[in-house]
Image (tube, grey):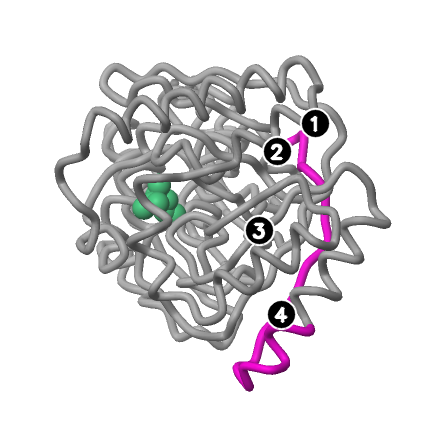
C-alpha cells in the first residue's frame, strides 16, 4: 500500500459526477437512477499530509471545513482507512444545485471517493466506496441512505436491497427519457424526512410493494406499460407533495402529454417524469413549463437520459 501511495502523491484526476433521481416514486430509499444531466465536476489531488483541503468554485457558499462538507467527511474516512499516510486537495464545481432533489450531496460524496480511489489504483471496492460516501449523506440528511450514492457510482438504475449489510444490484432498463422540472426553492432532505409518518397500514404496504415489484419487473422486461402503472406512491408522495408548488398539476399535465409516469425526485422539490421517446419527453417539458410559468416561481427544466457509466474520469 505504501508503494501505491508514494506513486500517487502529487497526481490529480478530474471527474464528472452525475445527478441522480432517488426513490423512483415507489421505492423510498431503495431505488435510484443516474442522469446524464446535470453533473458536477471535481478535481482531486493527492497530498502528503493527512488532511482534506476543499476549494469551492461555484456560488453555493458550501462549507470548506471538511468535517462539515459532504465530500470532506467520506475522504476523511478514507484517509483513516489508509492509516493517515495521505491527504486530498479537492476542487468542487457544483452544477447540481444543493437542495434540488437531484442528488447534489451524493454527487459530491461519491465523486470525491471515486476520484481518490482512482488515484490510489482502485484499492477500495465499490461497496467500500458506497460505505464511505454514505457518511456524506448522513451529514446532509441525518441518515445513511444509498439510493443516490449507488447509482451515482455505478450508473444505471440500482436497487439497494439493504444497507446493513450493503446489498446493491443493478437493474437493466429499456431506453427511457427523463424530464425534470426544478423549482428554484430549497427543500432540505432532513426536513422532508422528518414530516414522514413513522408507521404505515398493511393495506398501503401491500400496494407499495406491488408497485416496487412491478417497477423492477417492468424495467427488466422492457414493459413500458407496467413501468407506467407501477410509478405510484401511496406512502411518501401524499405527505411530501404539499412542499412542492403545483405538484398535482405538473403530474396531471405530464401524463396528458404522454409521460409513462413520475413523481417527486428524491426528497424534492424537483419533479421527474419518464417517457418512452424524446418527442414525448419534450412535450412533457413544455407541459411542465406551462404549469410553472403560471406559478410565478423560477424554475429550470432538463430533458435527459439514464447515465450508464456513473462517476466518469474526464482528465
Ligand atoms: N431516499 C431519500 C429520501 C433520497 O427520499 O429522503 C434523498 O435524496
CA–CA distance in space, label 1 to label 3 = 16 Å
- 253 to 70, vertically: above or below: below
Q: Which residue is mark 3?
A: 272
> Which element carries disc 1, helix, strand or loop?
helix
Highlighted magenta segment, given as a residue range: 290-309
Residue 297 showing in the rendered view: yes
Kindly report which numbered mark, 3 or 2, lies closer to the viewer in this rendering: 2
Q: Quadrant of the C terminus?
A: top right
Residue 315 showing in the rendered view: no
Q: Which residue is mark 4?
A: 300
Q: Name the foreground residue: 54 vs 109.
A: 109
Say left or right for 265 vs 79.
Answer: right
Kindly report which numbered mark, 4 or 2, lies closer to the viewer in this rendering: 2
Say left or right for 217 vs 128.
Answer: right
Decide: marks 3, 4 in contact (CB < 8 A)? no
Provide residue 101's location: percent of width, then percent of height.
44, 55
Seen at 79% across and 56% down, the residue is 282
Sequence order check, earlier mark of 1 and 4: 1
Q: Which residue is mark 1?
A: 224
Seen at 59% across and 62% down, the residue is 181
CA–CA distance in space, label 2 to label 1 = 6 Å
Provide residue 266's location: percent of width, then percent of height.
42, 48
CA–CA distance in space, label 4 to label 2 = 24 Å
CA–CA distance in space, label 3 to label 2 = 13 Å
Check disc 4: other Cα within 10 Å, few if <14, some if 14-19, many if 20+: few
Q: Name the foreground residue: 77 vs 12.
A: 77
Question: So how many labels did they put on this image?
Answer: 4
Tell me, for residue 93, which label it has, or none. none
Say left or right for 213 vs 284.
Answer: left
Q: Which residue is mark 2?
A: 228
Dot 2 beta carbon under 8 Å from ligand 1 = no
Amino acid at each position: 500500500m505504501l508503494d501505491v501511495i508514494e506513486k500517487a502523491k502529487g497526481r490529480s484526476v478530474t471527474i464528472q459526477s452525475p445527478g441522480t433521481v432517488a426513490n423512483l416514486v415507489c421505492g423510498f430509499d431503495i431505488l435510484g437512477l443516474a442522469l446524464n444531466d446535470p453533473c458536477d465536476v471535481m478535481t482531486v489531488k493527492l497530498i502528503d499530509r493527512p488532511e482534506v483541503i476543499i476549494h469551492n468554485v461555484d456560488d453555493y457558499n458550501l462549507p470548506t471545513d471538511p468535517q462539515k462538507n459532504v465530500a470532506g467527511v467520506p475522504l476523511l474516512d478514507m484517509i483513516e482507512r489508509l492509516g493517515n499516510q495521505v491527504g486530498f486537495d479537492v476542487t468542487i464545481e457544483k452544477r447540481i444545485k444543493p437542495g434540488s432533489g437531484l442528488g447534489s450531496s451524493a454527487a459530491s460524496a461519491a465523486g470525491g471517493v471515486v476520484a481518490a480511489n482512482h488515484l490510489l489504483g482502485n484499492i477500495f471496492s465499490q461497496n467500500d466506496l458506497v460505505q464511505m460516501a454514505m457518511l456524506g449523506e448522513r451529514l446532509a440528511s441525518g441518515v445513511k441512505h444509498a439510493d443516490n450514492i449507488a447509482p451515482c457510482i455505478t450508473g444505471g438504475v440500482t436497487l439497494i436491497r439493504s444497507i446493513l449489510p450493503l446489498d446493491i444490484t443493478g437493474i437493466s432498463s429499456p431506453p427511457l427519457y427523463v424530464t425534470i422540472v426544478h423549482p428554484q426553492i430549497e427543500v432540505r432532505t432532513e426536513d422532508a424526512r422528518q414530516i414522514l409518518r413513522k408507521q404505515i397500514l398493511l393495506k398501503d404496504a401491500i400496494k407499495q410493494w406491488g408497485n416496487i415489484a412491478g417497477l423492477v419487473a417492468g424495467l427488466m422486461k422492457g414493459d413500458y406499460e407496467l413501468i407506467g402503472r407501477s410509478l405510484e406512491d401511496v406512502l411518501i408522495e401524499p405527505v411530501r407533495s404539499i412542499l412542492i408548488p403545483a405538484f398535482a398539476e405538473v403530474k396531471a399535465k405530464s401524463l396528458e402529454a404522454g409521460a409513462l409516469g413520475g413523481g417527486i425526485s428524491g426528497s424534492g422539490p424537483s419533479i421527474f417524469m419518464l417517457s418512452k421517446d424524446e418527442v414525448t419527453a419534450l412535450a412533457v417539458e413544455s407541459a411542465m413549463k406551462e404549469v410553472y410559468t403560471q406559478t410565478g416561481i423560477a424554475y429550470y427544466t432538463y430533458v435527459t437520459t439514464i447515465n450508464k457509466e456513473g462517476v466518469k474520469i474526464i482528465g
